[in-house]
Amino acid sequence: MKIDILTLFPAMFTGFLSESIIKRAIDKGLVTINIIDFRTYSLDKHKKVDDTPYGGGAGMVLMCEPVVRAIEDLKKEDSLVILTCPQGKTFKESMAQELKNINHLIIVCGHYEGYDERIREFVDLEISIGDFVLTGGEIPAMAITDSIVRLLPGAINELSTTADSFTSNLLDYPTYTKPANFRGLEVPEVLLSGNHQKIQEYRQKEQLKRTKERRPDLLKEIHND
């Protein structure tokens, strides 16, 4: 898999690419992640990529030309272009499951006041990571990339992803490790029993209970499917 991330701030990705599961996936050859400063696609002698909005208003707007030139230079027949945007479709685990099968993703990080509206004509999918606004699209791009890469075969133990929260529209069950008793807080006895059937039943019950308490909206989605 190949992921190209277009950004004005490449240095923000240094730690993201050099630590933990992302680094291991890169080292294993499971994914290639390129961080590209789209200032390099500006035709302005000062590499300017933004300007004031027509009609007035606060802030600066990203210009069409450098962003579109970057997209067109990188895009292939099997590419999918993603725009990180508060107005986009809310990112979910099901979307990550779909995107992991795309050979080439191009993720465009916004900044400043927003994009020239015409940039939307050159993208395939707009994604939001929630109903809030950030200073730029770099953090959403990292979140999207992380959630996809961890699903690639060989990135992590497959069993670690099958019971993840949202995989079946349920939150994950509670987990424990040693010691069995920490300041009077004890691990549920069933988990110490060695009875795998009972443990599985307990975990399924806890998934339903936790989802009902914390995210009842997910249960409604199950019933509506």
Image: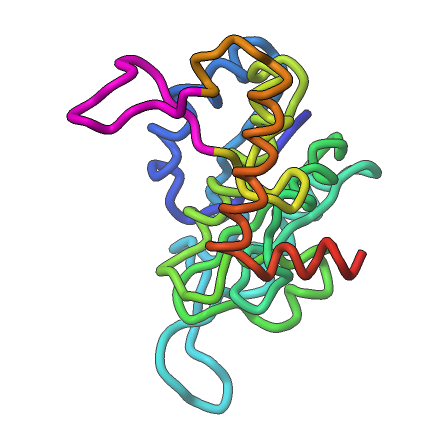
Residue farthest toward the bottom in the current orientation of the protein: 55
Considering the image in quadrants, where does the C terminus appear?
bottom right
Q: Quadrant of the N terminus?
A: top right
Residue 178 appears in which quarter of the rendering?
Answer: top left
Q: Please count the marks in the image.
A: 0
- Name of the residue lying farthest toward the left: 183
Along the viewing direction, whichever of 121 and 42 lies nearer the viewer:
121
Q: Which residue occupies 50% across, 85% down?
A: 54
Q: Considering depth in this image, is 61 or 223 the residue closer to the camera?
A: 223
Q: In the picture shown, does residue 198 fall above or below 209?
A: above
User: In x, y percent, where is residue 26?
Assistant: 53, 17
Question: Colour scheme of this structure image?
Answer: rainbow
Q: Is residue 141 above or below residue 30?
A: below
Is 112 covered by the magenta stretch?
no
From the viewer's perspective, is residue 186 above or below residue 156? below
Could you tell me which residue is drawn at 40 percent across and 72 percent down? 60
Q: Which residues are magenta?
A: 174-189
Residue at coordinates 50% horizontally, 45% vertically from top-left?
141
User: Can you name the residue that lies furthest to the right here?
Assistant: 77
Can residue 137 be seen in the rendering of this structure? Answer: yes
Residue at 61%, 12% in the rendered image: 29
Percent x, y of residue 78 = 81, 36
Viewer-proximal residue among 41 and 91: 91
- Considering the whole magenta stretch, tell me its main secondary structure: loop
Q: Is residue 186 magenta?
A: yes
Would residue 4 be seen by someone viewing this image from the given angle?
no
Q: Residue 169 in the image: state x and y as whole percent.
A: 65, 46
